[in-house]
Image (spheres, rainbow, N blue to C red):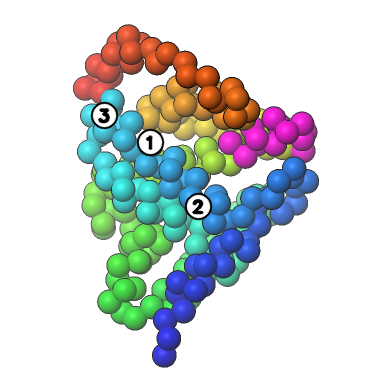
Amino acid sequence: MAVTFFAALARMKYIDRWALMRASRRENLSEHAAEVAILAHALCEIGNLRHGRQLNAERAAVIGLFHDASEIITGDMPTPVKYGSAALREAYHAAEERATESLLARLPKDLAAVYAPLLGIVTAAEEGGAEELYLWRLVKAADKLSAYIKCLEEESAGNTEFRTAKKTIEAELEKLAGELPELRDFMENCLPPYGNTLDELSVQGDWDEKKHTETAPDAEA
């Protein structure tokens, strides 16, 4: 029997996000996964270089690529529905688990053992302890960041449809940034240029090395 797992993953490009929102440009699941991978990798490297962490940034990037794979089967459930009540949250979580198990069933056992941890079937604690748990938190933060960046892009395009979503996600990120210094670092130093035009991004600003050096002792705390 043919292995259908990878062909199923290729369908991520057909799953639209923000289905209930009027967007200036549609975003599909494949695009979102790639952005989360980039952001998760960056957060881990910031943690390693500036905050004394020992995180596997490459692993975080791969987890980012697979983090919403179950939506190939469930679709992207709108947030107001997904979190509308405790019962809905539990039902959706159960649906996600069944969808993930369905995806893994499309693999032979040897490959399924490789991909199960990337899809969250093996818990972070079982896989690698405290650092692994922290890595997964950064991947989730990257997921939030990606959603916030989408809001910024829509706002820059003159679309007010994402205004409320932006405020909600911004508040969530601020709360997370109080616990994740890597996220705070990224939000302060890397997030502001998002939404800029190509010409604006082409203007090379001077990196404040002095400020970076002053914050470095934080990494040892």
Q: CA distance from mark 2 to mark 1?
A: 15 Å
Q: Nearer the viewer, residue 79 or 205?
A: 205
Counting from the top left corner in percent of width and height, residue 47 is at 31, 32
Residue 10 placement, left or right of 14: left
* Label 2 packing within 10 angstroms: few (<14), some (14-19), many (20+): many
**Mark 1 or mark 3, earlier in chain:** 1
Counting from the top left corner in percent of width and height, residue 174 is at 52, 27
Q: Which mark is residue 43?
A: 1
* Label 3 packing within 10 angstroms: few (<14), some (14-19), many (20+): few
Q: Nearer the viewer, residue 220 or 94?
A: 220
Helix, strand or loop under label 2? helix
For disc 2, the marked residue is: 33
Quarter placement of the N terminus? bottom left
**Mark 3 or mark 2, earlier in chain:** 2
Give the magenta part as a residue range. Answer: 149-161
Q: How many marks?
A: 3
Residue that lies at the very extreme toward the bottom in this rendered image? 1
Residue 191 shows in this picture: yes
Residue 133 shows in this picture: no
Q: Quadrant of residue 91?
A: bottom right
Q: Which mark is residue 49?
A: 3
Quarter placement of the C terminus? top left
